[in-house]
Image (cartoon, helix red, strand yellow):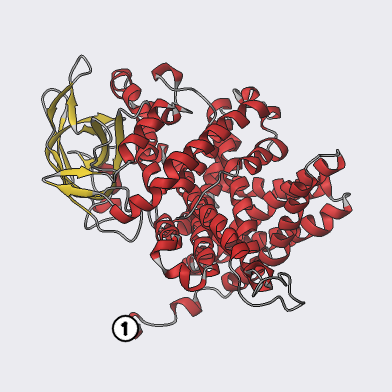
């Protein structure tokens, strides 16, 4: 069975050496001292390794079972969920006014990575609850907050988000679910929603569904959509649970992966719901949680890759196959371990350099969300809006690729279920699809985010990269291995953006045909910037006489690998973008 060890040391490096969280001036970050974050991360790592990881294969093998409308989670999930609640892990960054601990989102992000790596399907129950909590926290009335948030923070009640219907996914304007107003101010919700993660289960006494539906008078398309709170059990005035609502699980989907999470078809048959936020402004309420949700899915992409990578390293060091071309390195044995071979090293370095870059990128984005929320920093909010589609799309694409590459290290054993690598690949695949399929992320990036607020956010990104390079170019070692490649990659990104500006209006297909490449080009530049920052931090630590020289030297070598072997992909993506729409649109539909 695969194992998992939380990379707490690397997380500490990112938080304190790279982001320097206690020096940022973000309210609440002064509490994030090294000893404090170390204690939290170590405790979360212990839960991940001892409680969650052993259930990962169980959840995959057994899955969720539905009988007579009741969904049972895999054996051991109830006890693990109780342990998560008792440990306060579900309340980490939630509002203290409603029972949360009020810690920064960046710390909750680090903890969340461990929980996802250990057991992605299990963590979705509390992760989706957090998203629903966030929507109610921002858009709910005082009464709604008091009614729902304390129980959702503790995960005595869990939450879901109901968007997709059988005939519409991304195009929510086609939605058919109806909300009929009642005299008491409630609504009757009727319709069917599909792909509802954690829609029905036995882990909580109530499930609070947030449901998008069309109320009368809203007009066509997304303008007529509102968001409603529809609990599984009606909540009485005193907070106790009343009658069962007219919402039920029609079936649970049979899926490629994340078997331990119940993905449900939900039927609303005149269920009682209450408006959340403004009438006909449901999309705005939904988008409140979008940056957080998409960061969470981007995190899922690389976090599952992290678990797969750890096991691939163990296997590569243990499995004996062939001899090193430069001479036997295990002369007393019948063969050398896989890790002596350059191609195995290449695959492991691809994984390692991506994962550590992805972690830093994600933590930086989480820090920007904290800065936006806690300081009201509009520039941070704009930067987050720009990079979220990159983070979600690029990290899940590359995270899945990482899981598959880790599986490849095992050879034939990677294809056999008992080794566990298949599960990582199957679980990671969903992250590329849900919370907005990655093609949609690319369209959002090019079609909306580049021009947002007159393009000032992407210009701010270019300026940030330029400033970092200028401020550090006197450091010859950093310049050669990190800054020069970053400068070249950033120029590729700027050239691509200019191509869209010059061609997008007169030929929109030229921009959209290159959008996916642009998302990956942008992703590589983001990771290149993160690696340049990590390289600087590691070199500074060595110069200051850090005791763990091996850690920092490894960090520098890994960063140099990314800059030399991965970052040059920006030139390929640029060439594809500049080829325009003609190669993509050349065939008529009937020729396919």
Residue 77 figure quarter: top left
Q: Which residue is tagged 1?
A: 590
Instruction: From the viewer's perspective, tell me whether residue 417 is left or right of residue 180.
Output: right
- At 61% across and 30% down in the image, what residue appears? 37
Camera-nearest residue between 152 and 222: 152
Kind of element beneath mark 1:
helix
**At which x and y percent is residue 203?**
28, 36
In the image, is residue 249 above or below residue 154?
Answer: below
Residue lying farthest to the bottom in this orientation: 591
Q: Report whether 129 appears left or right of 8.
A: left
Q: Position of residue 396 (x, y in %)?
A: 49, 56
Q: Seen in the image, is 337 located left or right of residue 275?
A: right
Residue 508 placement (x, y as % from top left): 47, 65
Q: In front here: 447 or 243?
A: 243
Furthest residue toward front? 332
Point out residue 570 in the picture as x, y percentages from the top left corner: 65, 65
Quadrant where the C terminus is found in the figure = bottom left
The residue under the point 47% across, 69% down is 413
Q: Residue at x 53, y 32 (%)?
A: 43
Is residue 445 visible in this depiction of the protein?
no
Residue extending farthest top: 238
Q: Residues within 10 Å of mark 1 (few under 14, many from 20)?
A: few
Q: Quadrant of the N terminus?
A: bottom left
């Amino acid at each position: 069975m695969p194992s998992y060890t939380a990379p707490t040391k690397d997380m500490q490096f990112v938080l304190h050496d790279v982001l320097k969280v206690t020096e940022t001036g973000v309210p609440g970050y002064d509490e994030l001292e090294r000893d404090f974050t170390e204690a939290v991360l170590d405790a979360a790592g212990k839960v991940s390794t001892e409680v969650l990881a052993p259930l990962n294969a169980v959840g995959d093998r057994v899955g969720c079972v539905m009988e007579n409308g009741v969904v049972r989670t895999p054996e051991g999930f109830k006890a693990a969920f109780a342990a998560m609640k008792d440990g306060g892990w579900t309340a980490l960054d939630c509002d203290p006014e409603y029972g949360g601990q009020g810690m920064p989102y960046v710390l909750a992000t680090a903890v969340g990575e461990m929980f996802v790596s250990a057991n992605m399907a299990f963590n979705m129950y509390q992760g989706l609850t957090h998203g629903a909590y966030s929507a109610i926290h921002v858009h709910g009335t005082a009464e709604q907050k008091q009614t729902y948030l304390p129980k959702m923070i503790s995960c005595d009640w869990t939450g879901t988000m109901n968007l997709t219907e059988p005939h519409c996914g991304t195009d929510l304007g086609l939605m058919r679910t109806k909300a009929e107003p009642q005299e008491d101010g409630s609504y009757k919700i009727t319709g069917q929603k599909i792909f509802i993660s954690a829609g029905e289960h036995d882990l909580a006494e109530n499930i609070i569904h947030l449901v998008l539906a069309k109320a009368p008078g809203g007009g066509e398309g997304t303008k007529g959509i509102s968001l409603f709170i529809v609990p599984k059990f009606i909540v009485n005035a005193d907070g106790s649970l009343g009658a069962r609502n007219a919402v039920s699980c029609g079936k649970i989907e049979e899926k490629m992966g994340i078997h331990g999470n119940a993905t449900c078809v939900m039927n609303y048959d005149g269920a009682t719901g209450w408006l959340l936020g403004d009438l006909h402004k449901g999309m705005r309420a939904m988008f409140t949680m979008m940056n957080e949700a998409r960061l969470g899915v981007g995190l899922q992409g690389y976090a599952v890759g992290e678990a797969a990578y750890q096991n691939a390293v163990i296997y590569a060091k243990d499995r004996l196959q062939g001899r090193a071309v430069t001479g036997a390195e295990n002369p007393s044995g019948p063969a050398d371990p896989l890790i002596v071979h350059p191609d195995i090293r290449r695959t492991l370095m691809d994984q390692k350099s991506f994962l550590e870059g992805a972690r830093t990128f994600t933590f930086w984005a989480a820090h920007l969300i904290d800065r936006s929320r806690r300081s009201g920093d509009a520039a941070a909010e704009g930067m987050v809006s720009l990079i979220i589609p990159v983070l979600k799309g690029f990290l899940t694409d590359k995270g899945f690729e990482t899981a598959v590459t880790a599986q490849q290290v095992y050879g034939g054993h990677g294809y056999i279920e008992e080794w566990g690598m298949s599960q990582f690949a199957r679980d990671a695949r969903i992250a590329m699809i849900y919370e907005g399929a990655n093609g949609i992320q690319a369209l959002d990036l090019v079609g909306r985010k580049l021009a947002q607020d007159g393009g000032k956010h992407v210009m701010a990104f270019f300026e940030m990269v330029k400033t970092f390079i200028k401020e550090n170019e006197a450091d010859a070692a950093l310049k050669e291995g990190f800054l020069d490649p970053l400068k070249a990659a950033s120029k590729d990104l700027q050239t691509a953006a200019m191509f869209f500006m010059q061609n997008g209006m007169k030929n929109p297909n030229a921009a959209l045909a290159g959008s996916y490449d642009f998302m990956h080009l942008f992703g590589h530049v983001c990771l290149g910037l993160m690696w340049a920052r990590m390289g600087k931090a590691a070199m500074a630590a060595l110069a200051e006489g850090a005791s763990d020289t091996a850690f920092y030297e490894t960090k520098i070598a890994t960063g140099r690998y990314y800059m030399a072997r991965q970052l040059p992909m920006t030139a390929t993506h640029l060439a594809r973008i500049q080829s325009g729409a003609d190669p993509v649109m050349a065939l008529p539909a009937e020729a396919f």
